[in-house]
Amino acid sequence: MIRVRSLVVALSATLLLSTVAACGSGGDDAPKNVSAKTAALGTLTPGVLKVAVQPYAPYTTVRGGKIVGLDGDILTAVAKKLGLQVKPQVTDFAGMLAGVQSRRVDITIGGVAWSADRQKQGLFTDPPYYSPPAMAVRSGKTYRTVADLKGLNLGTVDGYVWVKSIQAVPGAKLHAYPDANGVFDDLGAGRLDVGFLDPLIIIAAQKQRPDLKITTEYLTPPTAAEVKAKPALQYFQPYQTGFYLPRKATKLEQAVSAQIDAMYRNGELAKLVTKYGGDPGQFLVPAADVATARRGVDRPNDWTPPSIGK
Protein backbone atom coordinates (compact mmCIF):
# COMPACT_ATOMS: atom_id res chain seq x y z
CA MET A 1 0.00 0.00 0.00
CA ILE A 2 2.23 2.85 -0.77
CA ARG A 3 1.14 1.87 0.78
CA VAL A 4 0.85 1.53 -2.74
CA ARG A 5 -2.41 2.18 -1.75
CA SER A 6 -3.54 5.71 -1.66
CA LEU A 7 -1.09 8.55 -1.25
CA VAL A 8 -4.02 10.77 -0.28
CA VAL A 9 -4.54 11.24 3.46
CA ALA A 10 -8.22 11.64 4.18
CA LEU A 11 -9.48 15.02 5.27
CA SER A 12 -11.07 13.31 8.22
CA ALA A 13 -7.73 12.62 9.88
CA THR A 14 -8.71 14.49 13.02
CA LEU A 15 -11.76 12.31 13.48
CA LEU A 16 -9.69 9.23 12.81
CA LEU A 17 -7.22 10.22 15.49
CA SER A 18 -10.09 10.42 17.96
CA THR A 19 -11.23 6.99 16.84
CA VAL A 20 -7.78 5.50 17.35
CA ALA A 21 -7.56 7.05 20.78
CA ALA A 22 -10.96 5.69 21.72
CA CYS A 23 -9.98 2.22 20.56
CA GLY A 24 -7.04 2.32 22.92
CA SER A 25 -8.82 3.59 25.99
CA GLY A 26 -9.36 1.27 28.90
CA GLY A 27 -7.71 -2.01 29.69
CA ASP A 28 -4.23 -0.61 29.10
CA ASP A 29 -2.67 -1.59 32.42
CA ALA A 30 0.86 -2.80 31.96
CA PRO A 31 1.38 -6.57 32.06
CA LYS A 32 2.93 -7.92 35.21
CA ASN A 33 6.58 -8.90 35.39
CA VAL A 34 7.76 -6.78 32.46
CA SER A 35 11.54 -7.11 32.20
CA ALA A 36 13.76 -4.07 32.45
CA LYS A 37 14.98 -4.75 28.91
CA THR A 38 11.43 -4.74 27.54
CA ALA A 39 10.44 -1.66 29.55
CA ALA A 40 13.49 0.17 28.17
CA LEU A 41 12.03 -0.08 24.67
CA GLY A 42 9.86 2.88 25.62
CA THR A 43 6.44 1.75 24.45
CA LEU A 44 3.48 3.87 25.55
CA THR A 45 2.53 1.19 28.04
CA PRO A 46 5.47 -0.90 29.29
CA GLY A 47 5.26 -4.42 27.89
CA VAL A 48 2.49 -3.50 25.41
CA LEU A 49 2.87 -2.76 21.70
CA LYS A 50 -0.07 -0.65 20.52
CA VAL A 51 -0.52 -1.19 16.79
CA ALA A 52 -2.71 0.86 14.46
CA VAL A 53 -3.88 -1.38 11.65
CA GLN A 54 -6.30 -1.35 8.74
CA PRO A 55 -7.90 -4.68 7.77
CA TYR A 56 -6.26 -5.60 4.46
CA ALA A 57 -6.12 -9.37 4.08
CA PRO A 58 -3.88 -11.21 3.55
CA TYR A 59 -1.47 -8.57 4.89
CA THR A 60 -3.35 -7.51 8.03
CA THR A 61 -6.57 -8.80 9.55
CA VAL A 62 -7.70 -8.65 13.18
CA ARG A 63 -9.24 -11.87 14.48
CA GLY A 64 -9.99 -12.50 18.11
CA GLY A 65 -7.91 -9.51 19.13
CA LYS A 66 -4.88 -10.74 17.19
CA ILE A 67 -3.35 -9.45 13.95
CA VAL A 68 -2.92 -12.13 11.29
CA GLY A 69 -1.64 -11.96 7.74
CA LEU A 70 1.89 -11.50 6.46
CA ASP A 71 2.60 -8.23 8.28
CA GLY A 72 0.71 -9.42 11.33
CA ASP A 73 2.65 -12.66 11.56
CA ILE A 74 5.97 -10.84 11.18
CA LEU A 75 5.15 -8.33 13.90
CA THR A 76 3.81 -11.02 16.21
CA ALA A 77 7.08 -12.95 15.91
CA VAL A 78 9.10 -9.80 16.54
CA ALA A 79 6.99 -8.77 19.54
CA LYS A 80 7.32 -12.20 21.12
CA LYS A 81 11.10 -12.00 20.92
CA LEU A 82 11.04 -8.54 22.48
CA GLY A 83 8.66 -9.57 25.27
CA LEU A 84 5.85 -7.32 24.05
CA GLN A 85 2.11 -7.97 24.06
CA VAL A 86 0.48 -6.85 20.79
CA LYS A 87 -2.71 -4.79 21.08
CA PRO A 88 -4.27 -3.82 17.74
CA GLN A 89 -6.32 -0.68 17.20
CA VAL A 90 -8.41 -0.80 14.03
CA THR A 91 -8.59 2.31 11.86
CA ASP A 92 -7.98 3.13 8.19
CA PHE A 93 -4.84 4.18 6.36
CA ALA A 94 -5.08 7.87 7.25
CA GLY A 95 -5.65 6.92 10.89
CA MET A 96 -2.65 4.58 10.83
CA LEU A 97 -0.27 7.34 9.79
CA ALA A 98 -1.87 9.96 12.02
CA GLY A 99 -1.79 7.64 15.04
CA VAL A 100 1.96 7.17 14.65
CA GLN A 101 2.80 10.79 13.88
CA SER A 102 0.89 12.00 16.95
CA ARG A 103 2.32 9.14 19.06
CA ARG A 104 -1.05 7.72 20.03
CA VAL A 105 0.20 4.26 19.03
CA ASP A 106 3.63 2.65 19.10
CA ILE A 107 3.69 1.37 15.53
CA THR A 108 1.67 0.75 12.39
CA ILE A 109 2.06 -2.04 9.85
CA GLY A 110 0.53 -3.22 6.61
CA GLY A 111 2.70 -2.67 3.55
CA VAL A 112 3.44 0.97 4.39
CA ALA A 113 5.95 2.17 1.81
CA TRP A 114 9.05 4.06 2.83
CA SER A 115 9.23 7.56 1.42
CA ALA A 116 11.48 10.52 2.09
CA ASP A 117 8.47 12.62 3.11
CA ARG A 118 7.05 10.06 5.53
CA GLN A 119 10.37 9.48 7.24
CA LYS A 120 10.47 13.17 8.13
CA GLN A 121 7.45 12.62 10.38
CA GLY A 122 8.20 9.15 11.71
CA LEU A 123 10.69 6.29 11.83
CA PHE A 124 10.81 3.35 9.46
CA THR A 125 12.22 -0.05 10.36
CA ASP A 126 14.35 -2.01 7.95
CA PRO A 127 12.06 -3.47 5.26
CA PRO A 128 10.23 -6.61 6.44
CA TYR A 129 9.77 -7.31 2.71
CA TYR A 130 9.88 -5.59 -0.66
CA SER A 131 6.68 -5.36 -2.68
CA PRO A 132 7.22 -6.31 -6.34
CA PRO A 133 5.14 -4.82 -9.20
CA ALA A 134 2.48 -7.50 -9.56
CA MET A 135 -0.11 -7.92 -12.28
CA ALA A 136 -3.31 -9.93 -12.37
CA VAL A 137 -3.73 -11.21 -15.93
CA ARG A 138 -6.11 -13.53 -17.66
CA SER A 139 -4.76 -17.07 -17.96
CA GLY A 140 -2.86 -17.67 -21.15
CA LYS A 141 -1.70 -14.09 -21.50
CA THR A 142 1.84 -12.95 -20.80
CA TYR A 143 3.08 -9.41 -20.23
CA ARG A 144 6.59 -8.72 -19.03
CA THR A 145 7.58 -5.12 -19.75
CA VAL A 146 6.05 -1.67 -19.97
CA ALA A 147 6.25 -1.97 -23.76
CA ASP A 148 4.01 -5.06 -23.56
CA LEU A 149 1.30 -2.95 -21.91
CA LYS A 150 0.94 -0.46 -24.76
CA GLY A 151 -2.63 -0.06 -25.95
CA LEU A 152 -4.11 -2.42 -23.34
CA ASN A 153 -6.96 -1.98 -20.88
CA LEU A 154 -5.25 -1.59 -17.52
CA GLY A 155 -7.03 -1.44 -14.19
CA THR A 156 -6.34 -0.60 -10.56
CA VAL A 157 -8.10 0.90 -7.56
CA ASP A 158 -8.86 4.61 -7.66
CA GLY A 159 -6.25 6.52 -5.64
CA TYR A 160 -3.53 3.88 -5.89
CA VAL A 161 -0.25 5.19 -7.30
CA TRP A 162 -0.44 2.75 -10.21
CA VAL A 163 -3.02 5.14 -11.68
CA LYS A 164 -0.14 7.51 -12.48
CA SER A 165 1.99 4.81 -14.07
CA ILE A 166 -0.89 3.45 -16.15
CA GLN A 167 -1.53 6.93 -17.48
CA ALA A 168 2.09 7.04 -18.66
CA VAL A 169 1.78 3.87 -20.78
CA PRO A 170 1.35 4.81 -24.46
CA GLY A 171 -2.14 4.05 -25.75
CA ALA A 172 -3.24 2.26 -22.57
CA LYS A 173 -6.75 2.87 -21.25
CA LEU A 174 -7.07 3.38 -17.49
CA HIS A 175 -9.92 1.71 -15.62
CA ALA A 176 -10.10 2.83 -11.97
CA TYR A 177 -12.37 1.04 -9.47
CA PRO A 178 -13.58 1.68 -5.93
CA ASP A 179 -11.99 -1.56 -4.72
CA ALA A 180 -10.12 -4.65 -5.88
CA ASN A 181 -13.32 -6.60 -6.52
CA GLY A 182 -14.11 -4.37 -9.48
CA VAL A 183 -10.69 -5.07 -10.96
CA PHE A 184 -11.15 -8.82 -10.62
CA ASP A 185 -14.71 -8.80 -11.94
CA ASP A 186 -13.71 -6.98 -15.12
CA LEU A 187 -10.65 -9.19 -15.59
CA GLY A 188 -12.86 -12.24 -15.39
CA ALA A 189 -15.34 -10.70 -17.84
CA GLY A 190 -12.60 -9.84 -20.32
CA ARG A 191 -13.04 -6.08 -20.04
CA LEU A 192 -9.53 -5.71 -18.61
CA ASP A 193 -6.23 -7.11 -19.81
CA VAL A 194 -4.18 -6.39 -16.68
CA GLY A 195 -4.94 -5.38 -13.11
CA PHE A 196 -2.33 -3.77 -10.85
CA LEU A 197 -2.79 -4.63 -7.17
CA ASP A 198 -0.69 -5.67 -4.19
CA PRO A 199 0.68 -9.14 -5.03
CA LEU A 200 -0.78 -11.15 -2.16
CA ILE A 201 -4.23 -9.74 -2.98
CA ILE A 202 -3.93 -11.21 -6.47
CA ILE A 203 -2.60 -14.53 -5.20
CA ALA A 204 -5.47 -14.81 -2.70
CA ALA A 205 -8.03 -14.06 -5.41
CA GLN A 206 -6.61 -16.83 -7.59
CA LYS A 207 -7.34 -19.31 -4.81
CA GLN A 208 -10.68 -17.90 -3.70
CA ARG A 209 -12.13 -17.22 -7.16
CA PRO A 210 -10.82 -19.87 -9.56
CA ASP A 211 -13.69 -19.03 -11.92
CA LEU A 212 -11.88 -15.81 -12.83
CA LYS A 213 -9.10 -17.80 -14.48
CA ILE A 214 -6.40 -15.27 -13.63
CA THR A 215 -2.70 -15.65 -12.93
CA THR A 216 -0.07 -13.54 -11.18
CA GLU A 217 2.80 -12.09 -13.15
CA TYR A 218 5.57 -9.70 -12.12
CA LEU A 219 6.43 -6.75 -14.31
CA THR A 220 10.06 -6.25 -15.22
CA PRO A 221 10.70 -2.85 -13.62
CA PRO A 222 11.22 0.06 -16.03
CA THR A 223 14.81 1.12 -16.53
CA ALA A 224 16.32 4.28 -15.09
CA ALA A 225 16.25 5.79 -18.58
CA GLU A 226 12.54 5.00 -18.94
CA VAL A 227 11.75 6.56 -15.57
CA LYS A 228 13.82 9.63 -16.40
CA ALA A 229 11.83 10.06 -19.60
CA LYS A 230 8.51 9.41 -17.86
CA PRO A 231 8.81 9.86 -14.06
CA ALA A 232 5.35 8.39 -13.41
CA LEU A 233 6.70 4.99 -14.43
CA GLN A 234 8.59 4.88 -11.13
CA TYR A 235 5.48 3.38 -9.54
CA PHE A 236 5.96 0.27 -11.67
CA GLN A 237 9.15 -0.36 -9.71
CA PRO A 238 9.32 -2.48 -6.52
CA TYR A 239 8.92 -0.51 -3.32
CA GLN A 240 10.29 -1.12 0.13
CA THR A 241 7.81 -1.53 2.92
CA GLY A 242 8.46 -0.76 6.56
CA PHE A 243 6.88 -0.77 9.96
CA TYR A 244 6.29 2.88 10.89
CA LEU A 245 6.93 4.36 14.35
CA PRO A 246 6.89 7.78 16.07
CA ARG A 247 9.99 9.96 15.69
CA LYS A 248 10.99 9.55 19.33
CA ALA A 249 10.71 5.75 19.34
CA THR A 250 14.34 5.21 18.39
CA LYS A 251 15.04 2.31 20.78
CA LEU A 252 11.93 0.45 19.67
CA GLU A 253 12.68 1.00 15.99
CA GLN A 254 16.22 -0.30 16.38
CA ALA A 255 15.06 -3.36 18.30
CA VAL A 256 12.34 -4.20 15.75
CA SER A 257 14.75 -3.70 12.83
CA ALA A 258 17.29 -6.01 14.45
CA GLN A 259 14.67 -8.75 14.75
CA ILE A 260 13.53 -8.26 11.15
CA ASP A 261 17.13 -8.56 9.94
CA ALA A 262 17.54 -11.77 11.94
CA MET A 263 14.40 -13.21 10.32
CA TYR A 264 15.97 -12.74 6.89
CA ARG A 265 19.02 -14.67 8.02
CA ASN A 266 17.29 -17.52 9.81
CA GLY A 267 14.69 -18.21 7.12
CA GLU A 268 11.62 -17.14 9.11
CA LEU A 269 10.63 -14.44 6.62
CA ALA A 270 10.97 -16.80 3.66
CA LYS A 271 8.63 -19.25 5.40
CA LEU A 272 6.03 -16.55 6.11
CA VAL A 273 6.11 -15.15 2.56
CA THR A 274 5.68 -18.68 1.21
CA LYS A 275 2.83 -19.32 3.65
CA TYR A 276 0.82 -16.55 1.99
CA GLY A 277 1.66 -17.61 -1.56
CA GLY A 278 4.46 -15.15 -2.22
CA ASP A 279 7.79 -15.84 -3.88
CA PRO A 280 10.69 -15.13 -1.47
CA GLY A 281 12.88 -14.31 -4.47
CA GLN A 282 10.50 -11.49 -5.34
CA PHE A 283 9.67 -10.32 -1.80
CA LEU A 284 12.98 -10.64 0.03
CA VAL A 285 15.60 -9.39 -2.42
CA PRO A 286 15.96 -5.60 -2.66
CA ALA A 287 16.13 -3.61 -5.87
CA ALA A 288 19.32 -1.66 -6.49
CA ASP A 289 17.80 1.70 -5.58
CA VAL A 290 16.60 0.65 -2.11
CA ALA A 291 19.98 1.35 -0.51
CA THR A 292 20.60 4.60 -2.36
CA ALA A 293 17.16 5.93 -1.44
CA ARG A 294 17.81 5.67 2.30
CA ARG A 295 21.56 6.10 2.65
CA GLY A 296 22.28 9.48 4.17
CA VAL A 297 18.55 10.04 4.76
CA ASP A 298 17.49 7.74 7.60
CA ARG A 299 20.28 5.17 7.33
CA PRO A 300 24.09 5.40 7.45
CA ASN A 301 25.97 5.91 4.19
CA ASP A 302 27.19 2.28 4.33
CA TRP A 303 23.76 0.73 5.06
CA THR A 304 22.99 -2.51 3.26
CA PRO A 305 19.30 -3.49 2.95
CA PRO A 306 18.48 -6.92 4.38
CA SER A 307 18.16 -9.74 1.87
CA ILE A 308 17.78 -13.49 1.93
CA GLY A 309 21.12 -15.26 1.67
CA LYS A 310 22.95 -12.54 3.61
Image: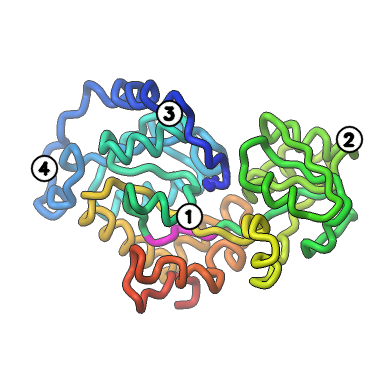
As measured in the structure, the alpha-carbon distance from the residue carrying label 2 to the one carrying label 3 is 33 Å
Is the C-beta separation of discs 1 and 2 under 8 Å?
no
Q: Is residue 151 visible?
A: yes
Region of the chain picked out in magenta, as a range: 126-130
The residue wearing badge 1 is 241
Q: Is residue 78 visible?
A: no
Q: Earlier in the sequence, mark 2 or mark 3?
A: 3
Q: Quadrant of the C terminus?
A: bottom left
The residue wearing badge 4 is 33
As measured in the structure, the alpha-carbon distance from the residue carrying label 3 to the one carrying label 1 is 19 Å
Examine the rendered structure and indicate whether residue 225 appears above or below residue 159: below
- Nearer to us of marks 1 and 4 is 1
Occupied quadrant, residue 49? top left
Give the side of residue 22 with respect to residue 176, left or right. Answer: left
Estimate the x, y position of residue 293 in percent, counting from the top left. 46, 67
* Disc 4 crowd, CA 10 A, few/some/many (<14, 14-19, 20+): few
* Disc 3 crowd, CA 10 A, few/some/many (<14, 14-19, 20+): some
